[in-house]
Image (cartoon, grey):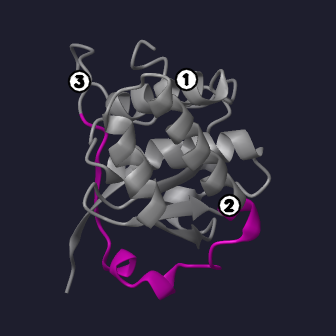
């Protein structure tokens, strides 16, 4: 049985010159719409069909670093929503997807995605293992923002920028949504 699955995707954190804009994110007026890819993909319901390996030490360290960033940002007067993001990150499962999966193909330039704002899994695309720990932490904060209920990519990007600025001094990278969100 096919299931309709919501996939929130994130461009790879490091801005790449000449990267093609992902279609469907802006209406003709230029107003931002929720960046939801609705995928009719029953294979996503079967994690084992696409998961390449389980959570590894580098990503575990990135999660710990992201949680420290979120706690520090909260202690420095950040928005109360940071607590929800930290909670979502603390309980999230992190799974790896092969670069043959459509959202993770190299030309897609994605670090990873979550299925929906009601899920508990962050999917990391193969090829992102070599990102610096700060970029990994920032990506986890962004995707955890979705898991904490923020559907809109601009809201999740604002949350990641706030957390990184207050908790780490500055964002590690500028994600692919920042310019489109006017941030």
Cα–Cα span, label 1 and label 2: 22 Å
Which residue is depicted at the point 62% across and 71% down? 98
In front here: 173 or 165? 165
Which residue is depicted at the point 39% across and 85% down? 46
Residue topped by disc 3: 27
Residue topped by disc 2: 59
Q: Earlier in the sequence, mark 1 or mark 2?
A: 2
Percent position (x, y) of residue 81? Answer: 31, 36
Which residue is depicted at the point 66% across and 21% down? 169
Residue topped by disc 1: 166
Question: In the rendered image, which quarter contains the N terminus?
Answer: bottom left
Percent position (x, y) of residue 144? Answer: 42, 50
Which residue is depicted at the point 62% across and 26% down? 171
Q: Could you say whether the residue bearing mark 2 is in a helix, strand or loop?
A: helix
Q: Earlier in the sequence, mark 3 or mark 1?
A: 3
Please state if 9 lies on the left or on the right of 167 as rendered: left
177 shown above or below 129? above
Tell me the magenta residue range: 34-60
């Amino acid at each position: 049985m096919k299931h309709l699955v919501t996939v929130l995707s994130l461009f790879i954190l490091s801005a790449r010159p000449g990267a093609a804009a992902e279609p469907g994110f802006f209406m003709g007026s230029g107003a931002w719409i929720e960046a939801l890819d609705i995928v009719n993909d029953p294979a996503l319901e079967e994690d084992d069909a696409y998961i390449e390996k389980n959570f590894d030490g580098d990503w575990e360290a990135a999660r710990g670093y992201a949680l420290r960033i979120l706690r520090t940002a909260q202690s420095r007067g950040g928005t109360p929503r940071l607590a929800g993001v930290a909670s979502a990150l603390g309980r999230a499962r992190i799974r790896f997807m092969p670069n043959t999966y459509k959202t993770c193909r190299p030309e897609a330039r994605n670090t990873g995605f979550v299925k929906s704002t009601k899920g508990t899994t962050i999917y990391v695309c193969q090829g992102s293992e070599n990102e610096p720990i700060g970029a990994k932490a920032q990506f986890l904060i962004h995707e955890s923002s979705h898991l904490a209920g923020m559907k809109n990519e601009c809201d999740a990007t604002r949350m990641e920028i706030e957390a990184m600025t207050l908790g780490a001094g500055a964002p590690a990278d500028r994600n692919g949504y920042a310019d489109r969100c006017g941030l």
